[in-house]
Amino acid sequence: MAPENKLDKKKMVVVEGSYAVAHAAKVCRPNVISAYPITPQTHIVEDLSQFMADGEIPNCEYINVESEFSALSALVGASAAGARCYSATTSQGLELMHEVLFNISGMRLPVVMTIANRAVSAPISIWNDHQDAISQRDTGWLQLYAENTQEISDMTAQAYKISEDKDILMPSMVCMDGFILSHVYEPVVLLEQDLTDEFLPAFEPDFVLDPKNPMSFGAFADPNYYTEFRYLQEQAMQKSLKKIEDVANEFYDVYGRYYGGLIDEYRTDDAEVIIMAMGSIIGTIKDVIDKLRDRNVKVGLLKVRSFRPFPAEAIRNALKDAKVVVVLDKNISLGLNEGALFTETKSSLYNTKLDVPIVGYMIGHGGRDIKVDLIEKIVDEAQEVMKTGIKIESQFTDLKEELI
Amino acid sequence: MKILPGGVCEAGTTRVNKTGGWRTFKPVYDYEKCIKCKLCELLCPDSSINPRDDGFFEFDYDFCKGCGICANECPKDAITMVLEEK
Ligand code: SF4
Ligand code: SF4
């Protein structure tokens, strides 16, 4: 049973999501921040610049750069020199970082970066979906997805604790839906400095770039060595599965707030239909579930907090009594006609005795609103699958036929 | 080379990781023409050109990958790339 959240109403303030994230990054005491402004991440770096200008982030250097590629490249050196590093980006900016993302994870640098998720070009769109981060899924970064402003704020501190663990040392992307969370004002309990200091001690790496004690970071590795580096990276990712759970609990002990570990479940106890999703859509789905439960529809929700590492075992356990599983994806792997969460979930169930029909929907691309009606319609269709046993695979829905 | 926790290695891995195994052409040096300008030593991306006490140079074929930069940049054409005999 998940612990109850203790949100102290007296401490609540109404702030923009971006401010909550910038504030969270600030109280994590970064030593180096390097980021390039890009919509809808801009407000985060604006707020951080303001904090810097006001002298509110001591012992920190803010590096101005001319692109996202440089932003992350600057952090390669800074992190290897032992600095706690922060960046934020989105969409094309994240794609421009692609090469450096591999370097950071390959050099095992625990950088934390907020992604204000946005669609990728072309056609150009500044609105939210998950294509940007999902396209970077194989770069060796942890990918955590937040449901609301409170969670994204708290997840930032959690990400540092996970990434900097000596057994892990892998970087994290902390993902929030662009505009939907970044530009919305919500009541939030901001991370407190004293509690955060207690929860997140200073970053003290065992190995740093130091002329007195030289080390090779990102060494040349011929075919005799390369595989072992990859193996160790994957091992660290597998270890982070437990670490994410542990850190969620440690966070609860200090702050009294809990959002699930790798996954979270909502009204799944006797659920026949289980909906799976990531990000801010979770809130809408919970409302739909409450409404449908009043009509005795047995539907529940499996919220995926960690997409990388992929919590296959936790998902298998959560789905074992479902009659049909619905996966909602705000992304597509072109050429497969599937969203990534759908693909990964299917592959997690293969080779187990669990033969539950699983239906994928690709929705909300390029920021299209996902309305309550649409989710209700999807649940209706899922119940139809349950009755007829006819398996639908993955599909687009909510298409404007008149445009195509 | 030993991989330490966190994927770093002890320093000096460039001395262990030999890059001379995939060469097709190798540079050959003509002492007569060389004016000891050091350009080749400076530009070799693999530090495979080592100075000698007499001011001339020699190639470390364990590391020279045969890219030909040294031959291309030598102002006196003192370096020639020749097909490697296996
Ligand atoms: S061929 Fe290339 S690697 Fe070899 S010595 Fe010349 S510059 Fe160096
Ligand atoms: S570049 Fe040519 S001339 Fe200059 S030191 Fe090297 S071999 Fe000699």
Image (cartoon, rainbow, N blue to C red):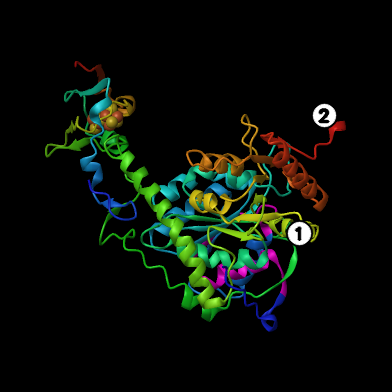
A345 or A240, which is in the foreground? Answer: A345
**Mark 2, residue position:** A404
Quadrant of res B28: top left
Residue A404 is one of the magenta-drawn residues: no
Describe residue B45's horizontal placement relative to residue A303 as left or right.
left
Query: Farthest residue in the front direction?
Result: A387
Q: Pick the quarter of the image with the N terminus of chain A.
A: bottom right
B52 or A303, which is in the foreground? Answer: A303
- What segment is highlighted magenta in the picture? A14-42
Residue at horizontal 73%, vertical 56%?
A285
Residue at horizontal 65%, vertical 45%?
A324
Describe residue A50's horizontal placement relative to residue A136 as left or right.
right
Q: Position of residue A207 (x, y in %)?
A: 32, 60
Query: Are the numbered discs 1 and 2 placed on the same chain, yes or no?
Result: yes
**Mark 1, residue position:** A293
Q: Nearer the viewer, mark 1 or mark 2?
A: 1
A383 or A70, which is in the foreground? Answer: A383
Q: Chain of mark 1?
A: A
* Residue A374 seen in this snapshot: yes
Tag 1–tag 2 contact (CB < 8 Å): no
* Three-letter amino acid code at the position of disc 2: Ile
Distance from mark 2 CB to nearest ligand 1 atom below 8 Å: no
Element carrying mark 1: helix
Q: Position of residue A6 (x, y in %)?
A: 62, 77
* Residue A177 seen in this snapshot: no
Q: Pick the quarter of the image with the C terminus of chain A.
A: top right
**Badge 1 or badge 2: first in the primary sequence:** 1
* Three-letter amino acid code at the position of disc 1: Arg
Question: How crowded is the residue under tag 1: few (<14 C-alpha within 10 Å), some, or many (20+)?
Answer: some
Q: Position of residue A202 (x, y in %)?
A: 42, 72
Query: Farthest residue in the bottom direction?
Result: A10
